[in-house]
Amino acid sequence: MKRAASFILTFTAALAANPLSAQNYPQQPPPYYGQQQSYPQQAPAYGTQQLDDLVGRIALYPDPLLAQVLTASTYSYQILDAAGWARAHAYLAPDQMVRAIREDGLPWDPSVIGLIPFPSVLNMLAGDMNWTQQLESAVLASRSAVMDAVQAQRSLALGYGYLRSNSQIRVVANPGYIEILPVEPGVIYAPYYDPYVVFRRPRPGLVVGGAISFGPRISIGVFAPWGWGGAAFGWREHAIIVNSRPWERNWENREAYRHQYEAVRPRAEAPRVERHELREYRGEERRRDDRREDRRDERRDERR
């Protein structure tokens, strides 16, 4: 059976076992667009070890990318849809992707849209929604403690020799805090590492140089309207800087706060209409299944 490329924007928990399954796109307004997450009235409390474990998988991200991840996590209910959109449009060049974002009127918070150039990061967030929602609650309830946990983990990785400057990142050890900055302004490489390795003392004789690897070169300049024009940290002040302004969303103002971005927030009052080609990206197992199904259809056609 020859399949037309199709994609549904809204994901459900049932897709976890088969995240790239396609359906007709779109049939009805996505249920989560513009809707706030329901939160408990009482802000959660986290211990130091809990936060250390929570931030481990992102603590070594370059500061601009980490700032985007922390802010985007507070809109966790939008992550699944954004990850799917990013996968379906991963074939687009950066300027084409910006055009598609604008044409589609993506209704998510700009912090979430700002991660679309990093589908691997969105997939990581979407692939473990329990963790993402815990990060969301921690950032909203205890941003200062989350940032302290990041610094604690960076200090461990630096002390054990795993975290160091290279051709992708510049590690700057300041009194009281460690910055991880891109070597080339406007270019971000997402790192890959095992938190159970880089935050623990290496075994004698272990070569630590290859413990952190990096993804492809991502130019973020054209994505400036979605926070990349100035994403950083004020580590001493425990401030997250997005679009060159302090990002001040917290547990108390989470429903009302809207950060200022260059990008205009579209209103989602009707189903979106795709204005360009969609492509699906499936795992090798799914592609083999499709080929087998195609062959079965061909044999069926021959028998008729």
Image (cartoon, grey):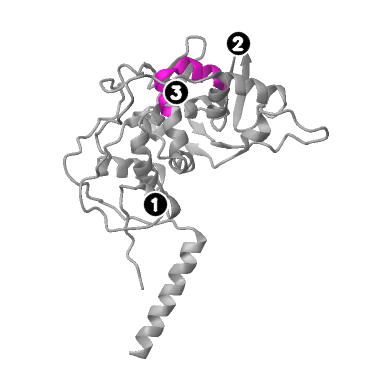
Which amino acid type is shown beneath numbered disc 2? Gly
Sequence-earlier tag: 1 or 3: 1
- Name the residue that disc number 3 marks: 138
- Name the residue that disc number 1 marks: 15
* Residue 134 drawn at (x, y percent): 44, 30
Decide whether the magenta segment is chiefly helix, strand or loop.
helix
Which amino acid type is shown beneath numbered disc 1? Leu
Judging from the image, what secondary structure is the residue with disc 3 in?
helix
Gap in angstroms between the C-alphas marked 2 and 3: 22 Å
Gap in angstroms between the C-alphas marked 1 and 3: 26 Å
- Residue density around tag 2, few if under 14, some if 14–19, many if 20 or more, within 10 Å: few
Q: Which mark is residue 262?
A: none
Q: Nearer the viewer, residue 201 or 218?
A: 201
Q: Which mark is residue 176?
A: 2
Sequence-earlier tag: 1 or 2: 1
- Viewer can see residue 115: yes
